[in-house]
Image (cartoon, helix red, strand yellow):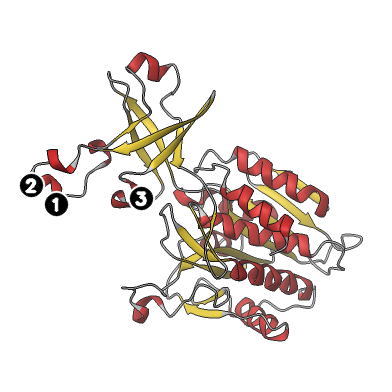
Amino acid sequence: MEHTSHEFLKALLETPSPSGFEQQIQHVVRERMRPVSDEVTTDTHGNVFAARFPDGRPADAPRVMLAGHCDQIGLMVQYIDGDGYLYIQPIGGWDMQILLGQYLTVWAKDGPLTGVVARRAIHLLKPEERNKVPDFTDVWVDIGAKNREEAEGLVRCGDPVTFSLGYRPLRNGLAASPAMDDKVGLWVCMEAVKLLHGRPLKAAVYGVSTVAEEIGLRGATTAAYAVNPTVGIAVDVTHATDTPGNDKKTQGDIKCGGGPVLYRGPNISPRVFDLLEATAKQHGIPVQVRGTPRATGTDANAIQIARAGVATGLIGIPNRYMHSPVEVVHLDDLTNAAKLLAEFCAAVGPETNWVP
């Protein structure tokens, strides 16, 4: 991965962006994309659009939307008790067993605060409590405050909270971080737009950093209405099944480092799938294929049914340990996905037929 692109990835991963609190990361996106885009805009919902246009912006040029969501799962301060402990509620889907015992960051108005999420020590739990997964009301965040007055001087109800953020390289091209879901998909979309800089195009290409995916595909819904794309491709993470205990009979045989995953199924246009697969073959880009027999829980779902309907594709980045503080991806899958998207966009023109 090229150095500045790698630094952009790390910047995305180290910038907080729980759903509804994406302002900081969208600033990072805009700063990165202005030098390599024809136009960078932000809508009232908070979606950021980085666009490349054909020369002269002909009226018959198709519009290609590349969507990667910038928001991550998070937490929100809901209550501060008399001793200064914070009680939290989830933003997005959480596994409580993953949350316990983690370092957290409270993103308060006057600056980030380190905290830990905990409950009573195992020695103090009753036997029936030890065998029960706790609820959010059973745990608290300790920021070291002496009492409610001190805590309320630092934190407000509604402040967002995340895992302690940080990018860590692993061996053999792998890397770990919270929020790979879906900052790697966002990176792929923006890197594809960057790769198109200076290349002749027959289609307008919109790289979109969508908001609020983790709470119901909200950003993609409004962004797709605004772009009114001819064809749309969402890039999100998908479950890698190359770790112990996964059922490949239901989830497919998906490997980190095996290449980006092309989805097939009723949420996917067969024309888009075929062109993605042919483009990958033409340019020697390794890909994996996964079937999805229903509507996906990704931005592709919202894009497909925008306005009068959109020819839609979905690319997955294999991800181990999704929605945890140690999500793992292979960097080659990211760079190959970006190359594939760029070549796909370069191949699209007014003559491309999207009717099944």
Q: Amino acid at mark 1?
A: Asn
Tell me the CA gap for discs 2 and 3. Answer: 25 Å
Instruction: Estimate how packed mark 2 is, as few (under 14), some (14 to 19) or many (20 or more) residues with alpha carbons within 10 Å.
Output: few
Report whether 191 appears left or right of 118. Answer: right
Q: Amino acid at mark 3?
A: Trp
Residue linked to disc 1: 131
Q: Earlier in the sequence, mark 3 or mark 1?
A: 3
Q: In this picture, is 94 found above or below 191?
A: above
Decide: marks 2, 1 in contact (CB < 8 A)? yes
What is the x, y in percent for residue 222? 60, 49
Q: Earlier in the sequence, mark 2 or mark 3?
A: 3
Quadrant location, the N terminus: bottom right
Tell me the CA gap for discs 2 and 1. Answer: 7 Å
What is the x, y in percent for residue 257? 55, 74
Q: Residue at x 41, y 35 (%)?
A: 76
Residue linked to disc 2: 127
